Image: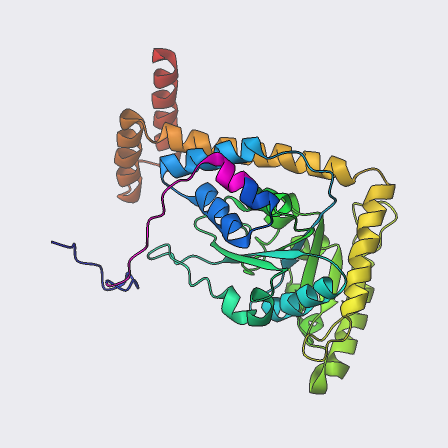
Amino acid sequence: MASKLSSKSGINPKFSVKNRTIKELDYYLNGLMEGNRYILSECITLIESTQNLKRDAGIKLLSALPKSDKKSIRIGITGSPGVGKSTFIETFGLFLIENGHNPSILAIDPSSQINKGSILGDKTRMETLANHPKAFIRPSASGNILGGTAAFTKDAIRLCEAAGYDFILVETVGIGQSEIEVDNITDVNVLLLQPGAGDDIQGIKRGVVENADILIINKADGQQLDLAKQTMRYYKNAIQLFHHDTKGWSTPVLMMSAIENTGVKEVYQAINDYQKCLTDAGIFQLNRQRQEMKWFEKQCDEMMHKIVFSNNVINKSFNQLSKEVRNNKISTSAALAKMEVVFNSMIKSN
């Protein structure tokens, strides 16, 4: 008998997912080398899977990827909900294709805190680009990961590059101050802003703006054009207060309209200029090496958390102490001290 779903689950009880079998390693490698979008999608599914066999197959695939001399650029697209990230990406992606590039888009959707599911509707918002044979769009759920990205976005980027995509665009969740994790997996961080956003600049967290390499006032068209110009002037003045980490680079503030297709060329040029600035300064590859180390450390932290709390003694102690803290039977500091004793005893016993 099928188990009853919670009324808050939000899941259609008649929905079912077809479970695909794991294929030989050469199937995935050859498919990537041929630029097969469907096999690329299968590869990303492997690395995102929570099933051990599929996840192991994904790790073997990543380890077997040949080193490529092809140059790529990884671009993070951040901005608050409603700023027009998907519309911007579709217009920019089509521009890239017209200029001989192959763009891939990794769109991160926020996950429900109730059932952990995501709508994953980015393909429907970028229908023209999604149907273009030279583009690849992959929506992924953020899960419990903060920072606007998903747990395996970094690995998905490598797979896209192996499949021949040279512009990798990562569209973040768009939830505010936590939108800084994307800087650890991309080369260029583009922040989209609404016309009129300058009025609220005092309320914007410095981390989000300081982290941006390029600022774009989006939706600069129609009745909002004058407001967009005013916002651009406001940010050009404000950005002078920030010091960019890359020597010789001053964060540009641009205007763009995805609807009227204006300002796209300037955005493209700014991205290329920043890449050249990084390369000329000799830090383009150094940044990627730093990102690899941060990714390794982050994955190690998550792995250790998973291993530690899979231990019955530790898990039982944690649950018991959590209950006591919640019921005000013990202070948080005292509970932490007891957990430290449990951790140390487990380490010594091994």
Residue at x 29%, y 44% (from the top left corner): 326
Residue at x 54%, y 60% (from the top left corner): 175
Relative to residue 17, is residue 211 drawn left or right? Answer: right
Image-quadrant location for residue 78: bottom right
Residue at x 26%, y 40% (from the top left corner): 323
- In the rendered structure, does residue 21 fall within the stretch colored magenta? yes
Task: Give how far across and how far down residue 153 sits, in percent.
Answer: 55, 47
Task: Give how far across and how far down residue 259 sits, in percent.
Answer: 67, 79
Observer-nearest residue: 335 or 175?
175
Q: In which quadrant will I find the C terminus?
A: top left
Image-quadrant location for residue 154: top right
Q: Mark yes or no: residue 101 visible.
A: yes
Observer-nearest residue: 285 or 331?
285
Secondary structure that dominates the magenta span: loop
Task: Give how far across and how far down residue 73 sits, in percent.
Answer: 72, 49
Relative to residue 32, is residue 91 drawn left or right? Answer: right
- In the rendered structure, does residue 263 fall within the stretch colored magenta? no
Above or below, 166 against 120 in this view is: above
Q: Mark yes or no: residue 329 visible.
A: no
What is the count of numbered marks?
A: 0
Residue at x 85%, y 51% (from the top left corner): 249
Observer-nearest residue: 325 or 128?
128
Relative to residue 269, is residue 210 drawn left or right? Answer: left
What are the residue bounds of the magenta stretch? 14-29
